[in-house]
Every structure is written in structure tokens, then in C-alpha cells.
């Protein structure tokens, strides 16, 4: 049975264009666009009609960095694939790329299968996977080739968390060399974890146990040093590199230098680094624990460098690193020892709205908003033009966005399965009104109409910036 929907009268915004156009959706895909009020648009004819007059019509967001149901620090992230993808939809995101985890001593296949089992039948929106490589050996390297063939085309390594996810320079180099051969993209958590562990030990010995010390020991220079080292290792291997959650101006400078030299090096930042700071980590009565994540929040003056990097394209993507832990019972594990606070913030529902606020505030343009939140992550991770744009043939992942609606972010009204909001009380302009995923209504006029199991696993091609 064919289905037809027409979205009429909105301003269609993609990374490259803004046009007052009607959008025809047939059988879950964009079939055509035509300038509003023209004979071509009128010819779209009958079917379900969505009135987008006075609204933006934008591609569904692509969040390239989430951690649903992730075990960490003796507990597990509070959002399941069901609650997390529902919250993502409420925030205008229609595709997530989550991280499957290889356990030390285990295989990539075992890790990927475990994540498929968590997600399958539970997601409200489409999803894909990156692979965290925790144990580089000859078998792992062979498995990387097989994963690329089945659409898991990016591999994350950690210079941080010794004893958990950490890889040394030799292991990183081997994985990068393999990626250079098979077309995969290495994603790097760039912090010098060996040095950070020394500083953690010393801080605790001095009795410095509050959450704010999490930010003080994870120094910006150690993020910059690791970023520089990752770039050089990638250069030696002849491999592309994608640095996740860049937070420090010194790390942005390393990326800019590498890109100026013509290297295939890419950088991602997250809303928490653009809108929050060490002031939050220093909140009294252990409230700062809500803001413990790694890389950590930085002093406010780093924000200007991140915005600048987004404008100059030295940073290309804004993802969330959504990894929520409840304040009660989870973040509290670190009372008296900041190193035991589970690392991670909730944010999958807030990203599109915060970045629209950045448009309102003059940090970025409307098209750049769509570029960093939809189009570039889709291209970076081999999902474009199926995802990330509104063009004939693309999946009908479409958001009707009201640019004038005002809202106050709060744990009382958000849909993430976590007992606090990192942006509690923040007023923003702009709000999601209606969301379609492959032509199916997930949010209809601020009512949730989606269902677990609609979201499908989406295999990816290799990074489209390397062709």
C-alpha cells in the first residue's frame, strides 16, 4: 500500500539551500520538492497534508555519538535504546550512531552482537553502530575488515581510561594502518590517560575529592598533547582521523594546524562544551557531579575557540556524547572521590534546540546549523544522502521546526530517562513540532505517536570526505 504525505508552506533548510517549498513524501522517501504555490507544488495532489506555514522544514538530526545502555564505572547509562531514541525524536534527531563495545579478551563480533541485541526491536528512530576497539590483536585487525563490509565503518580508540578502554601508541598505530587499508575511520578519545591517572592519584592524596577536581586533573594540555600524538600516528599510518568531543582551545589549534597542512583530520565538539563550563563543575553540595564527563568541561574562555572552529570548519560536527547517569544512585557513587563519578551527560534531546539558539545568538547561520547537526555527520559516517538532507530519494526523515516557540529546558519536561537536566532553567527559542522518520509520524504536533521497533539498523558506507 503506497502512502503519500505533502508538507506545505514551510521554509526548507538544508546545508546548502533555503527555499520556500512544498515537500512530497511517497513510501517513506522524499519524492519531490516544488516552490510553494506553483503549479508543480499543486500537482502533488491529495494525501496527508502537514501545514508548515511559518515553520522550518529541516532534515532530521544525525547524532553521531551516543551511548545508550552503556556499562561504565560499575553502573549502566540510564537511557535504554527505547527511552533514548524516543527522547532523540522529541529533540528532532532521527538517526543515532551508537557505540558497540569490544571487551578486553573478547572479539569485535561478540561486542557488536551484544549491541544489536540491545537495540533490535526497541528503537523509535533509525540507528547505526561504531565499534569501540579495546583489545588490538591480529584477530581484531582481521575483524575490522569484516565489520567494514557489513556497514560498521568506524572504530573508536581511547588514549584515556587505562585498564578499561586504553590503547597504547603501538596498538593505535596498528589499528590506524588497518583502517588505511580497509577504508575505516578511526575515532579517537584524545586525552593522555596515563598522565591523568597520576594527577588523579595526587589530587586524592591531597584530599581534593570534589567534582570540580575532575576538571582540574584532566588538563587541557593533556587533551592537546594526545590530539597532537593521534594526528601524528594517523599521518604515519596514512589514515584519516576523527577526534571526538573536542573541548579545549589548544586541541582545536592542533586540529587547525593539521587541516592547514592538508591532512584528513576531523573534529567533533558537543553542546556541553559550547554552553557549559567549569563553573558548573564547581557547583556546591556535590551538584557539580551532574557535569562530570570526559573530556571535561573547560573554563568559559574556551568556548570562543570552539565556536570559531565551527565557523572555520576546523570542527565539522556537533554530537552529544549522550551518556546519562542519574544524580541519585549513580553520580552519587563518587561522593568523597571524584574519580568514581560515572562520566557522562544527558543531551540527545537538547542538541538541535541548543544549536538553533546558537543561530538566534549569531554564532552560526541557519544552514551551518543543519550542516553540523545533520548533513556533515551523515557524510562523515557514510549515511548521506539517505540521511542528513531533504532531496528526492532521501529517507523522509523530516522535522517541522517552530523557530519562534520559546521553551525552558527542565528535567520535569524532558523525555530522557535521567533525573536532572544539564541545562535546567535555560530559556531557548525554537522547538520541534512534528517529526517524521521514513515518512512515519513519530512526533505529531507535540504528541508522541512513534513506537519501539520502527527504527531500523542502517548499514553505512565509508567516510564520504575521503572519496
Image (tube, rainbow, N blue to C red):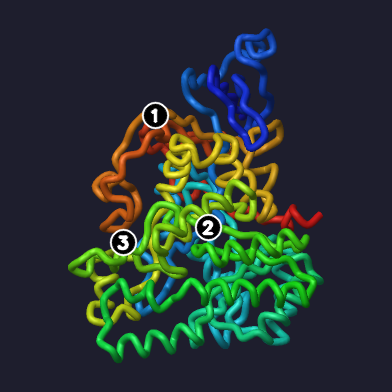
At 55% from the left and 85% from the top, the residue drawn is 104
The residue carrying mark 1 is: 445
Looking at the image, can residue 49 be seen?
yes
Front-most of residues 201 and 133: 201
Instruction: Answer few, some or many: residues within 10 Å of disc 2's Cα (few below 14, many 20 plus, some between 14 and 19).
Output: many
Of badges 2 and 1, the one in the foreground is 2
Left/right placement of residue 325 relative to residue 242 reads left
Mark found first going from the N terminus, 2 or 3: 2
- Mark 2: secondary structure: strand
Distance from disc 3 to disc 1, alpha carbons, whole Å, reads: 37 Å
Instruction: Answer few, some or many: residues within 10 Å of disc 3's Cα (few below 14, many 20 plus, some between 14 and 19).
Output: some
The residue carrying mark 2 is: 269
Of badges 2 and 3, the one in the foreground is 3
- Mark 1: secondary structure: loop
Q: Quadrant of the C terminus?
A: bottom right
Residue 279 image label: 3
Q: Residue 176 at what x, y percent from top left?
A: 72, 75
Looking at the image, can residue 86 be seen?
no
Distance from disc 2 to disc 1, alpha carbons, whole Å, reads: 31 Å
Front-most of residues 118 and 379: 379
Q: Residue 89 at what x, y percent from top left?
A: 45, 44
Left/right placement of residue 329 relative to residue 249 reads left
81 in relation to 6, above or below: below
Mark found first going from the N terminus, 3 or 1: 3
Amino acid at each position: 500500500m503506497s502512502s503519500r504525505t505533502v508538507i506545505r508552506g514551510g521554509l526548507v533548510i538544508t546545508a546548502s539551500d533555503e527555499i520556500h517549498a512544498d515537500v512530497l513524501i511517497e513510501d517513506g522517501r522524499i519524492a519531490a520538492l516544488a516552490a510553494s504555490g506553483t503549479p508543480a507544488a499543486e500537482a502533488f495532489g491529495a494525501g496527508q497534508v502537514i501545514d508548515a506555514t511559518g515553520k522550518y522544514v529541516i532534515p532530521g538530526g544525525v547524532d553521531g555519538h551516543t551511548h545508550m545502555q552503556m556499562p561504565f564505572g560499575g553502573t549502566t547509562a540510564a537511557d535504554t535504546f527505547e527511552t533514548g531514541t524516543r527522547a532523540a525524536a522529541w529533540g528532532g534527531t532521527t538517526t543515532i550512531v551508537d557505540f558497540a563495545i569490544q571487551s578486553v579478551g573478547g572479539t569485535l563480533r561478540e561486542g557488536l552482537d551484544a549491541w544489536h541485541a540491545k537495540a533490535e526491536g526497541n528503537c523509535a528512530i533509525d540507528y547505526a553502530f561504531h565499534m569501540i576497539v579495546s583489545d588490538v590483536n591480529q584477530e581484531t585487525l582481521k575483524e575490522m575488515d569484516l565489520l567494514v563490509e557489513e556497514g560498521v565503518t568506524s572504530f573508536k580508540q581511547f588514549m584515556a581510561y587505562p585498564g578499561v578502554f586504553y590503547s597504547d601508541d603501538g596498538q593505535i598505530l596498528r589499528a590506524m594502518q588497518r583502517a588505511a587499508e580497509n577504508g575505516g575511520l578511526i575515532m579517537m578519545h584524545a586525552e593522555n590517560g596515563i598522565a591523568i591517572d597520576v594527577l588523579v592519584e595526587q589530587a586524592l592524596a591531597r584530599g581534593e575529592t570534589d567534582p570540580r577536581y575532575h576538571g582540574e586533573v584532566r588538563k587541557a594540555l593533556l587533551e592537546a598533547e594526545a590530539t597532537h600524538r593521534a594526528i601524528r600516528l594517523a599521518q604515519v599510518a596514512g589514515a584519516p582521523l576523527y577526534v571526538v568531543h573536542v573541548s579545549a582551545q589548544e586541541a582545536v589549534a592542533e586540529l587547525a594546524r593539521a587541516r592547514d597542512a592538508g591532512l584528513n583530520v576531523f573534529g567533533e565538539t558537543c553542546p556541553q562544551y559550547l554552553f557549559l563550563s567549569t563553573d558548573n563543575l564547581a557547583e556546591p553540595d556535590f551538584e557539580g557531579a551532574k557535569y562530570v564527563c570526559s573530556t571535561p568541561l573547560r573554563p568559559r574562555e574556551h568556548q570562543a575557540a570552539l565556536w570559531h572552529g565551527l565557523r572555520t570548519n576546523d570542527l565539522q560536527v556537533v554530537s552529544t556524547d549522550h551518556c546519562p547517569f542519574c544524580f541519585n544512585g549513580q553520580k552519587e557513587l563518587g561522593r568523597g572521590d571524584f574519580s568514581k563519578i560515572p562520566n557522562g551527560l544527558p543531551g540527545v534531546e537538547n542538541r538541535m534546540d541548543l544549536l538553533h539558539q546558537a543561530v538566534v545568538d549569531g554564532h552560526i547561520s541557519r544552514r551551518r546549523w543543519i550542516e553540523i547537526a545533520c548533513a556533515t555527520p551523515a557524510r562523515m559516517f557514510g549515511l548521506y544522502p539517505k540521511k542528513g538532507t531533504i532531496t528526492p530519494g532521501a529517507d523522509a526523515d523530516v522535522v517541522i521546526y517552530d523557530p519562534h516557540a520559546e521553551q525552558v529546558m527542565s528535567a520535569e519536561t524532558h523525555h530522557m530517562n535521567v533525573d536532572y537536566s544539564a541545562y535546567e532553567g535555560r530559556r531557548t527559542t525554537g522547538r520541534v513540532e512534528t517529526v517524521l522518520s521514513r515518512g512515519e509520524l513519530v512526533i505529531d504536533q507535540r504528541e508522541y505517536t512513534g513506537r519501539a521497533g520502527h527504527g531500523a539498523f542502517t548499514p553505512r558506507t565509508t567516510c564520504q570526505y575521503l572519496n
